Every structure is written in C-alpha cells, then in structure tokens.
Amino acid sequence: MTGLEQSDDGSGDFAAVAYREEDYWDVDLLPVALTEDLKGLLHALRQQPSISGAIGLVSVGDDFFILARVYGRDNVSLFLSDVTASVDWPVARQVLEFLEIDQPHEDDLDQVLPAGDLSILADLGLDEMELGALAGDLDLYPDEVLASISERLGFQQGFQRALDGMG
C-alpha cells in the first residue's frame, strides 16, 4: 500500500466482501479503489455467490463506513454511517445519490447521522438499534465498528485474516 492508502497507525481505507456458502462465511479483500467507487463496489458484490447476499464492508479514513448488501442482480441495500461525510468524500455522495437523499446543508454538519437501511443486517442478527448505536459511537473508528459487526455476525476470524493480508 502507498502512504496515501495507509495511515501511520497501520489502518487504512479498505473494502471487503463477506458471503456465506452453506454454513460457512468467507471474507475477501476487494481492491482499495472500490472505497472510492460505489458502482464498482456493487458490481464486485454481485460477483459473489451467496445464500444470504454478499455484504460489502468499506472503511474510509477515520471518518465513516459503508455497508452494502446485494441479493442477486437488482436487490441492493446500503447503509452510510455519517451523512456529513458526503461533503468531503465522493463515495459518500454516491451513496446518498443512490439512496435519493440530499446532501446535508452547512448548518447540519455538526451532527453525525446515518443514512440508508438500518435493518440491512437484521436477519443475520444485528438489529437496527445495535447498528445505529455502533454508527453513532464517536469513540470507535470505522474499522473498529466493522470488526465489531463481523464479530456479531460470526465472521470475525475471516474478517481479521483478510485485514491482516493488507500488509
């Protein structure tokens, strides 16, 4: 990874896909370029075979995360942890455009508010209240929230193995 893709503390932007085949979760890293390209991310997720839909987990800087879930070709659910990220990050704007949500006004930038489908992972055991609480916890970095989500859904080892492969 280049210095732009990885911060001094070893964390960096990443995109991963988690998918389930039978009773087994698999997690793979996706190209880091997909942290900047929602259309490309959704295309990559559609390529994964899964009985419960492919789940995209994207961490961007220390600022926000995106969850994407794709069932088949046309059924897409998205969750953005912080709408204010759309002011600085094109991929966050792409998520809001996909969700048909306006960017926040300048006087609304002091609140961290999520957007999208809070029930995106409810059928897998992470309900709306838990996801909302995780997204709103300002003491956690996006990669830490995604690690917590992976633990709650049962693919923490695969998720950690994939992140360890980042270098």
Image (spheres, helix red, strand yellow):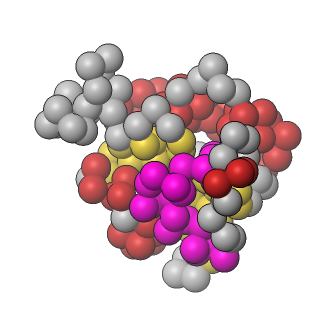
* Foreground of the two, 109 or 128: 109
Q: Quadrant of the C terminus?
A: top left
* In magenta segment, residue 94: yes
Q: Position of residue 73 (x, y in %)?
A: 52, 81
Q: Where, by quadrant of the figure, is residue 9 drawn?
A: top left
Relative side of 154 to 35, left or right: right
Q: Of helix, strand and loop, which mostly describes the magenta segment?
A: helix
Q: Is residue 79 above or below residue 26?
A: below
Q: Is residue 64 visible?
A: yes
**Point 47% across, 27% down: residue:** 157
Q: Position of residue 158 (x, y in %)?
A: 43, 34
> Residues in magenta?
81-100
Point out the residue furthest to the front here: 107
Q: How many marks?
A: 0
Q: Where, by quadrant of the figure, is residue 152 drawn?
A: top right
**Point 44% across, 66% down: residue:** 38
Q: Position of residue 28 (x, y in %)?
A: 36, 46
Q: Position of residue 59 (x, y in %)?
A: 45, 41
**Point 78% across, 33% down: residue:** 133
Q: Quadrant of the N terminus?
A: top left
Q: Is residue 126 above or below residue 122?
A: above
Point out the residue furthest to the right here: 129
* In magenta segment, residue 46: no
Point out the residue furthest to the bottom here: 74
**Point 70% across, 27% down: residue:** 137
Q: Is residue 47 visible?
A: no
